């Protein structure tokens, strides 16, 4: 028997029937919104997703909110949470499972529980605070040293924000006339781009951090929901790790964001930040003025005391001068007396030494002459012996030289078998100088002989 078969539409109708009978009611579902978009007709289309512990996607389904329900639900959601219904929100929604033959399965959202979203936001905010505390970041920026004076400010804000305009107005037209130098680093201050935009501005400032004394993050008020980005861990951690003191003026009177908590100092509004900077400079100027006045008073008192002292010295100087002159005179007289005494004593010592020397001189001269006579007599006695020794040495050297001369006599050399060959009266020492037929004279120890060259044999090298 063949297996039953269905057309696609028949199968889809069966699926729809199964779902309607199997899941007939409405169910509360926890999920996260994604890809929320509003159709021109007013219908809201989105996806509901669920993420696992590792932030990986574990479930996804399409969902719709029809226009006649969306406007009332969104208004109630905003009234309770201060947030517009949008993507990346944790929500608790009441849904009905539907299936359409053309569009497949989806969930029709019938209601939203705003209190769940508020609780989830609070939970995420507390989780962010706990993580910052574990990592030691909560008070890290508060430990930065605040420079004095505080005059070079890097501002992170939107140039069109009212809060930025108010901030600059308070700085530029302050009643104390103090001057503050600022540089704006533009950033998006609301919406999804807030965190990456502000973190990027902090990174850019870090490249020029020596040019600034502090960083100010400001925005111009708005709904509580718009503060959500300032509860983000990435943004708060970046502020905490900044090596410059960070001031925040987020612009909300009732709520304190996590970024406010990690900042060096937080203020409710941008103008409060400006007032703090201006007043700190004004206090510094006041302290400097007070110190200047104290310095002037101290200088006047010192000059008055010096003048009084000079007047007293004016009367004392003549008397002191006379006393000094008299003292110097007495000192000179004592010095002259001591000099005379010292000179006389020195002369007496020298005179005594001369007398002693005069007595000892003849004896010393006599002893010296005796020594010289004795050395002379000894030298005269040794003279013949020295002369004889020198003459003997000279005679032996002369005999040796005479013997050397005799040994070098050519006749003595020829007696040992050598002869002298001459050609044209000149001695021949090289065979290369001869040629056949040349007449030679050969001298021996006794007599000479004549010869003729027959052949020359040069020395082989």
Image (cartoon, rainbow, N blue to C red):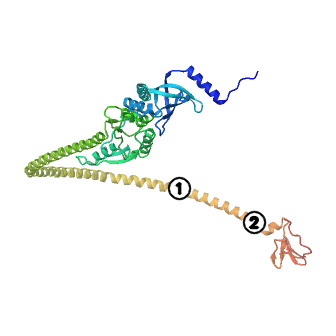
Displayed quadrant of residue 400: bottom right
Tell me the SS state at disc 1.
helix
The reply, left or right, for residue 187 in relation to residue 292 is right
On the question of residue 84 being in view, the answer is yes
Q: In which quarter of the image is the C terminus?
A: bottom right
Q: In which quarter of the image is the N terminus?
A: top right
Residue 209 rendering spot, x and y as whole percentages:
40, 44
On the question of residue 139 being in view, the answer is no
Nearer to us of marks 1 and 2 is 2
The reply, left or right, for residue 133 in relation to residue 302 is right
Residue designated by label 2: 406
Residue occupying the far right of the picture: 454
Residue 263 rendering spot, x and y as whole percentages:
37, 35
Crowding at dot 2, Cα within 10 Å, few <14 / some 14-19 / many 20+, comes out as few
Q: How far apart are marks 1 and 2 (CA)?
A: 40 Å
The reply, left or right, for residue 285 in relation to residue 412 is left
Q: 415 or 240: which is nearer to us?
A: 240
Crowding at dot 1, Cα within 10 Å, few <14 / some 14-19 / many 20+, comes out as few
Residue designated by label 1: 381
Query: Which disc number belongs to residue 269?
Result: none
């Amino acid at each position: 028997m063949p297996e039953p078969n269905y057309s696609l539409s028949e199968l889809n109708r069966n699926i729809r029937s199964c779902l309607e009978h199997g899941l007939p009611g409405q169910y509360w579902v926890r999920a996260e919104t994604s890809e929320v978009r509003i159709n021109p007709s007013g219908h809201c289309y989105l996806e509901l997703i669920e993420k696992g512990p590792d932030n990986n996607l574990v479930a996804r389904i399409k969902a719709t909110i029809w226009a006649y329900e969306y406007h009332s639900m969104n208004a109630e959601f905003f009234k309770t949470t201060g947030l517009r219904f949008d993507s990346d929100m944790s929500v608790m929604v009441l849904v009905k499972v539907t299936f359409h033959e053309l569009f497949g399965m989806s969930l029709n959202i019938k209601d939203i529980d705003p209190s769940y979203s508020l609780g989830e936001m609070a939970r995420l905010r507390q989780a962010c605070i706990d993580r910052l505390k574990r990592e030691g970041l909560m008070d890290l920026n508060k430990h930065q040293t605040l420079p004095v004076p505080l005059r070079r400010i890097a501002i992170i804000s939107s140039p069109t924000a009212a809060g930025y305009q108010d901030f600059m107005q308070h700085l530029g037209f302050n009643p104390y006339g103090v001057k503050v130098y600022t540089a704006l680093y533009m950033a998006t201050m609301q919406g999804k781009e807030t965190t990456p935009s502000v973190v990027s501005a902090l990174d850019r400032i870090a490249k020029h951090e020596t040019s600034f004394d502090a960083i100010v993050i400001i925005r111009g008020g708005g709904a509580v929901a718009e503060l959500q980005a300032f509860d983000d861990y990435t943004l708060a951690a970046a502020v905490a790790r900044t090596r410059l003191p960070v001031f925040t003026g987020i612009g909300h009177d009732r709520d304190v964001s996590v970024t406010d908590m990690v900042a060096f100092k937080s203020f409710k509004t941008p103008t409060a930040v400006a007032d703090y900077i201006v007043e700190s400079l004004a206090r510094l100027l006041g302290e400097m003025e007070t110190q200047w006045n104290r310095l002037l008073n101290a200088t006047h008192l010192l000059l008055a005391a010096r003048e009084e002292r000079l007047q007293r010295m004016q009367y004392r100087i003549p008397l002191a001068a006379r006393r000094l002159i008299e003292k110097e005179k007495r000192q000179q007289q004592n010095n002259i007396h001591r000099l005379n005494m010292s000179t006389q004593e020195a002369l007496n010592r020298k005179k005594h030494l001369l007398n002693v020397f005069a007595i000892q001189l003849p004896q010393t001269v006599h002893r010296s002459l005796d020594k010289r006579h004795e050395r002379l007599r000894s030298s005269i006695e040794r003279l013949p012996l020295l002369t004889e020794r020198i003459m003997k040495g000279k005679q032996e050297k002369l005999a040796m030289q005479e013997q050397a001369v005799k040994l070098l006599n050519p006749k003595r050399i020829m007696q040992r078998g050598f002869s002298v060959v001459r050609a044209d009266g000149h001695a021949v020492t090289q065979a290369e100088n001869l040629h056949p037929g040349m007449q030679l004279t050969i001298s021996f120890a006794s007599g000479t002989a004549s010869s003729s060259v027959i052949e020359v044999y040069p020395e082989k090298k």
